[in-house]
Every structure is written in C-alpha cells, then in structure tokens.
Amino acid sequence: MDWNLLLQSYANVLLDPQVLLMTFIGAAGGIILGAIPGMTATMGIALLIPFSYGMDLITSVGMLLGVYCGGMYGGSISAILIHAPGTPSAAATVLDGYPMAQKGQAGRALAIAMFASFCGGIIGAILMTFLSPLIANAAMSFGPAEMFMLALFGLSVIISISGKSIVKGLISAFFGLLICTVGMDPTNGFIRYIPKSAYALYEGLPFIPTLIGLFAVAEVFLGYEKYCGKGEVTEEVQAKVTHVLPTGSDIKLIWKNILSGGLIGTFIGAIPGAGGDIAAFVSYGVSKNFSKHPEEFGKGTPEGVAATESANNGCSGGAMIPLLSLGVPGDSVTAVLLGAFIMKGITPGPMMYVNELPIVYSVFAALLLANLAMLIVGMLGVRGFVKIISVDKKILMPCILIVSLVGAYSINQNLFDVGIAVAFGIAGYLMTKYDFPLSPILLALILGPLSEQNFVRYMNIVDGNIGMIFTRPISVAFMVAAGAFLVYSVISQRKVNKKTQIKDEQA
Amino acid sequence: MKKMKTQAFANLICALIFAGIAVYAIVVSMGFRQFKNSTVNPSVFPQIMAGGLLVCAVILLIQSIIRLPKDTTQAPTLSLRDRGIRHMLLCIVITIAYTFLWEYVGFLILATITMMILMYLIDMRKPVLMIVVSVVLPVVIWLLFYKVLSIAVPLGPLEIIYDVF
C-alpha cells in the first residue's frame, strides 16, 4: 500500500470545499429521502446522476455516497418514530427503535442509530481501504450453493426475531416464504397462484409496498382502534432530547454490537446480491443471542438499534469492495455508481488498482467523508426529527397513512401497489393483534426469492445431485453455522420466555 | 370466562386459518405444470413452504387444544360493540375507498377529503387546524414528489396542473 498516496488522496478529498459541500448536500438529501417510506437510496442516487454530469468524478462520487449513507440512516428515522421503515435496510431497526420511542426515548434511539450508522460506515470504509482485494476474492467465490446457504443462514435468525412464541414466529416466516412463491417461477417462467392476467404480480409481491403495509398502515389501523377505544386518550410521548450523541454509558453498552454489526455488514455487503436488509437482521440475531440479557431485545434496547444500524451502514463500504476490485456491483446502489464511473470514462475492476490508484484512494476518502457528513447533518437534525412524535396522534395518524400510501405508489408509480399496501396493512393489523410477529414475514420476503433462485440454479448445475453441496466448504460452513445458530436461538428463546414468565409472576 | 373468548381459542382459530391456507397452497400447487428437463419444478418450493406452514399450524392447534381447558387469558376482541373496533373498521373502509377512487378523483382532492374524514373519525374537533393540515400536507407531498423526485401522482380532474407547471 502506498501510504503517501493514500494520505495525499485523503487530504485532497477532505480539504476540497466543492467535494465537502456536495457530500454534505448529498447526505442531507439522503437522510430526507430515506426517512420517507417508499423512497430508497437507489432512487435518490438515480435522481442525482444527471446533476453529476457537470461535476468532476470525486465530487460526484462524494455526493452520491452522501446520499447512500444518508439514506441508510434516514430509513431509521421513520422506523423509530412512526413504525414505518423508510428503507428495507431499516426494517430490523423497528424491532427495538420503535419501542424505545414509545418509552419516551426517541431522541436517545435516534442518536444511537446515527452514531451506530456512522461507526458501521467507518468500519466498512476502513475494511474497504485495507482488505478490499482479499474480501473481494472471498465474496467472488460465492456461487449459487453458497448464496442458498447464506439465505438459509439468514433465515436461521427467525427464532431470534419471533418474540414470545417460536411457533407463531415460524408460522409468520413460512407464510412469508409461501407468499414469496406467488408470481412467475424463477426458472421455467410458470405463473403460480395468480391468474395470467395479473401482470403486476408476475415478479412477485412488490417488496416495499408490502413493507409499508405491514408496518406503517397496520400501525395506523391499530392506532385508530387504540385511540378511539374505551375512553382512551392520545398520550403525550415525551420527545425531549438532552444529547444529540449517545452518552458515555450508552457507548459502553453498545460498542460490541456496533463492532460486530459493522463487520457483519461489511462482509455481507461485499457479497453481490446481499444487502443492508439481510445484514441488519443477521446482526440483530447475533447480538441477541450473544447478549447477557436477550429478554430485553424487542422491548426497546439500545443494543438492538446499534446492531442493526451499524450493519446496514457497514454494507456501504462492503458493497464498494467488489465494485472497485472486480467491477461487480454489490447492490443496486453500487450498480448506479458503476454507471457514474463509466460515464466519467473509468472502468472499475482489478486494473483500477494498477492504473487509477489515486482515484481508488479518493473513493475510500469520499466514503469516509460521506459518513462524517451523515453524522453531522444527523446531529443537526435530531431535535427536529423527534418533534414528529410529539405531534398530536389525531393529526399524526392520518398524515402517516397518506404519506405511506403515496410512498407505496411512488416506487413503481402503480396504484396496484397501493392496494397491496392496504391489503398487507389489514393482514399486519390482524397478525399484530393476535401476537404473530411481522418481522419474520419481512425476512422471508427478503430471503425467500434469494433462496429459491439459488437453490434451483444450483440444482440445475449439479443435475439434481443435492449431495454435491457438501463438497463446497463455504456452503458447509454456512450450513453448520445456521444449524448451530438455530439450536442456540431456540435454547436462548426458551430461557428468555422462562425469565419473562418469572418476572410476570413476581409482578 | 367463556372458552371462546380465551387466547387459546383465538390461537386455535388462527391455527385453522393458517392450516387452511397451507392446504389450499398444496392443493393448487399439485396442478402446476411439470417440466421434464427441470431438476426443480415450479411446485417444489411452494410445497415445501406450505408443508412447513401446515406443520407449524398443527403444532399451534395442538398447543391451543391442550391449553384451552385451563386458559383464562382474554383474547383481543373484534367485537363491533367496541368503539375502537368500529372506528378502525371505518378507517379500513375509508382507506380501501381511497385506493379505488385515487385514479378518478385525484390525489390532491381525495387526500384532502380523506384526511379531514380520518381526523374527524379519530375525534379531532379543531376545524381550522383540520382544514389547514388536510390542505397543506397533500400539497407539500405533491410538490415534493413532482418537483423534487419527478414522480407525477394521478390528480384526476386536476391533471391540468401538470400542463401549467
């Protein structure tokens, strides 16, 4: 590694006023966009591409990475405040972020989410700087068998996010996996469970409208029942913010989760096809299982928020690794970034480390700067964001519904998606009411298509001989890890249930 | 307490519903076309998932039957005698109507009217505030989506605005 060149590139990026300005603008835009349910960082980057035509490469990359990192954190704002994950990557943040807000700790949750996002992003950027070629090679050895096993490993987290009843969690998960099979089958193109005229469902259920329905719309229905019920008055949720950054004691509590989340996020982000949503759930499951008090997870613990947010932002660095090292985008955002590079006449790939090393180092620096910009803009905004939940629920509930439904429409600009959001809103309401957890459905919707596609692809490659999967070390490692994780999760969840039962009896 | 109002009975009903969904999925998947050259046919994955759902639903069913005689936990109600349930159902009906009418009435008009009705439904009784919020929010959302994000939401009779702007 050429340290002089590395430091020089960092100095050039961090001291360039134009790069600084555009990265901060990008981060602010990303946070706002990410906070709107239905809007994703990919959409923000795609919208900004035309504006980057006139800028030089690093300025435009800085701006686009600002949107990327800002969008990742922005998604957690609505997840924490109104139970509506702004982006799929923030879906796992709902699990503990929203209960924290309900306990009057919205400011604390936002500060932790922001700090964890920043740290996760920095971990990703550092790993990207020093281990890029190494991780890229490991990630590239992922074929269909490994991807299938990664999906199974991801699904092993289900027990950890099932709440009180493992059976109900599994029912939710299988229900989610079953509805993933609606639409065209990935290999033969056979239409399953829908009439041939239902074109809108050929590619399966649209993920973001389903997410909006299950969480945001269902929450509004539950709110109407609660606040219009027997003399129930809309309670004031305390929204006082004393710190815009986590306190020393909070950092002491969450640093392990941040570290593990950042590492998990970077590694999963580096695997093409796997993104922040998977990383966040895996990190949450790992943090819960290794926590000294797993019973607190799902009830509003800072560790849960830190684990998910550091993982989804760690992905930003991870996803850049295969892009720069091999020219293979790790997710949809880096696919758009690849377009930006090509537009500027630079083709990412192994030769970039030989011919364009200053640009590679400048991109590393731009990612670091983007995370810093996200932290600063986030800190400035925390007090303002928190005010949302102090708005009277009688105004807030209708507003959430209208914004959520527009968000569902915007992703494909299709009114059918609004119908999907409403249908899943009703399903989400009923399932929440009868204690069926919603997060396993979401995880199933993320991992179901990934597992089926890769399973079928692998079976076609090995001509139906499933035993061949045991000859692939990474697959076997994931299989063993998934099995161990599953068993450990069941034991851990039983302990949690016993503890909770004893506490309830004592109360 | 009547057994039909217990959590165990609610779980039993839920288990039957999910078991029904699983059986339906399995039966329908049996009619899926089989491809001779394919190692994994389109029915395989749905049948595995529906099988898993069925097994879990049966476990929940057995658990519920065992717990039913002793269970005293009251299940959440869906009774129409509860004002909260009535208002929630009205909210769902309004939301469904909103979805169907969006294309014809347009976002700006429909969202304004819907917001006012929904606020009234949740016992908001400040007319000025209701009108201001119901008008301002849809306009701000529309401007944000149209001008910043280049997303044109259907405006129905007000579609003419797109020609002006």
Image: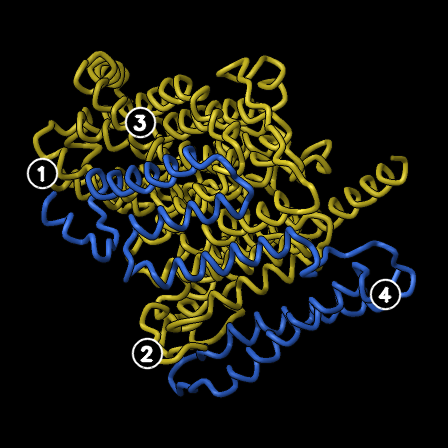
Chain colours: A yellow, B blue
Q: CA distance from mark 2 to mark 3?
A: 42 Å
- The answer to whether tags 2 and 1 share a subunit is yes
Q: Which residue is mark 2?
A: A197
- Give x and y (percent) for residue A419: 41, 62
Q: Which residue is mark 4?
A: B3
Look at 40% across and 72% down and name the residue there: A183
Does residue A146 show up? no
Look at 54% across and 59% down and name the residue there: A426
Which badge, 2 or 1, is on the more N-terminal residue? Answer: 2
- Give x and y (percent) for residue A394: 52, 38
Subunit of label 4:
B
Q: CA distance from mark 2 to mark 4?
A: 45 Å
Look at 81% across and 60% down and name the residue there: B6
Name the image quarter holding residue A67: top left
Which image quarter is the C terminus of chain A in?
A: top right
Say which of marks 4 and 1 sits in front: 4
